[in-house]
Amino acid sequence: MADNMHYDAIVVGSGISGGWAAKELTEKGLKVLMLERGRNIEHLTDYVNADKEAWDYPHRGTATMEMKDNYPVLSRDYPLNEQTFGMWANEQENPYVEAKRFDWFRGYHVGGRSLMWGRQSYRFSDTDFTANEREGIATDWPIRYADIAPWYDHAERFAGISGTNEGLDILPDGQFLPPIPLNIVEKDVAARLRNAFGGKRYLINSRVANITEALPDQNRVACQYRNKCWLGCPYGAYFSTQSATLPAAMATGNLTLRPFSIVKEVLYDKDRKRATGVEIIDAETNMTYEYTADVVFLNASSFNSTWVLMNSATDVWEGGLGSSSGELGHNVMDHHFRVGAEGRVEGFDDKYYFGRRPAGFYIPRFRNIDGEERPYTRGFGYQGSASRQGWQRDIAELNIGADLKQALSTPGNWTIGMTGFGEMLPYHDNAISLDRGTTDKWGLPVLSVSVDLRENEMRMREDMKQDAVDILEAAGVKDVKPVDRDYAPGMGIHEMGTARMGRDPKTSVLNGNNQVWDAPNVYVTDGACMTSASCVNPSLTYMALTARAADHAVKALKNGDL
């Protein structure tokens, strides 16, 4: 419980960007209140499934019919299972409206989706920051790569990103710990790929937020290759709010954490044109409270930060705080994926590997760069891995007895597979809005979501599939098959863009420092702020933008500019 009612800063949300905001602001001397709508999860002690194996679960880890009935959206994909059950938002208490299908997978607890993310961590390139202006799409980013590069350095050093420097303009190098090694098949495919495409296509180590060397100052131990990351890591080996940013913020003595706190609105002084704080609903008691602050950071996730803005200052702007441009809630983006290829690799039956890596390989974008023009704009990269089939493989000919046991104790074929992650353009009418006719458990209006893929993305997906086939065949992979699985927006769990940054208050919600044009002491640094999506995972960019914005906020407060 937060006994004080005034703080220097309030941070709304405790996921990847919220944790970073709390860390940066407290380390710079501000007294900070972090508000989280869900329950607390303590590092180590609350990772209840971190040491369990498949046989420890009543249904061997699979989703039950009851779970599927209660979580119809989550059941559309892999997140619904016994291992992570209870870590995703309750859909009955937190409904939303799908004007068009959108698979919204939410984590309402301290740490948010930082406890369950894929940890792939790549920098946007200068090509990404200039693409909108160059192509006349949406609006221009108000920053360039040079503006954020030092903050990428800062984020990588603290979070601990393992990887390799490759000297590629399209995928900038970083401050990396030693990589999680490629296995022998991946190394072979990488060499073949370089030769096959004249050095134009590269297979490199995944860049992941799993540390490969201990970080004693953070009490984090190197990755143990358990591949149980989304269950919470007892070693602190992967970056999360609990393992990294929250302990750092708490160590300052400047942070107050209040879980079960649903932020209803940002309080706005129309005379000063500044926010004065927030109003919350206690999720357990339904009591309302007001907390005041000099600065507010919205880090509740892309859609929920925008929800808060839409529900704020409606007596001034019908569409809410930050809506004066007409862009609040618009330009939803995700990464479209689940298209690629897979096949069988010969010649390595006497080779195996150690442990269960939480990583694989990455093939950086190679389309629509260096003057190439495909029948779509932007591009995609691939994530994948090679491995040997294990005991779970189906052997129809050996279905009982000693022969079956022997077969299942022998490693199967080497296989390799990969899926493309493609950029989605920021279309104005891909949007979210408040549906005041539908309410959640606490009587608050819910979001209505209307997002779909367009011709540009559909054309890109054809290349994503065919290029994957071509790459594997060129690398000598056998029995290559294209993969084209069901995808709907949201499945990438990279929703972003609903309160975009820009250079002009008439066409954007935020300025180049992530401040709301209509209330400069309100900062938004989660996925909502994104002006375009690139084709790489966005979380590292959220970290860097948050650290940059926090630095700006503290300096502005000291100068009396807020």
Image: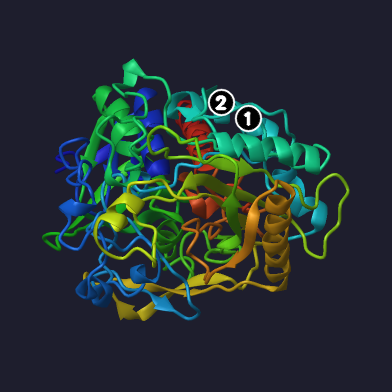
Quarter holding residue 34 = top left
**Three-letter residue code for mark 1:** Ala
Between residue 123 and residue 329, name the one nearer to us: 123
Tell me: 22 left or right of 511: left
Tell me what residue is drawn at x 26 percent, y 47 percent: 291
485 up-or-down from 514: above or below: below
Between residue 458 and residue 395, name the one nearer to us: 395
Quarter holding residue 340 = bottom right
Q: Which mark is residue 149?
A: 1
Tell me what residue is drawn at x 34 percent, y 30 percent: 224
558 up-or-down from 514: above or below: above
- Residue 510, image x and y in percent? 57, 50
Q: What element carries label 2?
A: helix
- Circle 2/circle 1 CB separation < 8 Å: yes
- Image color mode: rainbow
- Residue 52, image x and y in percent? 20, 45
Between residue 140 and residue 59, name the one nearer to us: 59
Farthest left residue in view: 285
User: Would you say residue 419 is visible in this rendering?
Assistant: no
Image quadrant holding the N terminus, namely: top left
Q: Which mark is residue 96?
A: none
Tell me what residue is drawn at x 49 percent, y 67 percent: 317
Give the Cα distance between marks 2 and 1: 6 Å
Q: Residue 153 carries which label?
A: 2
Dot 2 crowding, Cα within 10 Å, few <14, some 14–19, many 20+:
some
**Three-letter residue code for mark 2:** Asp
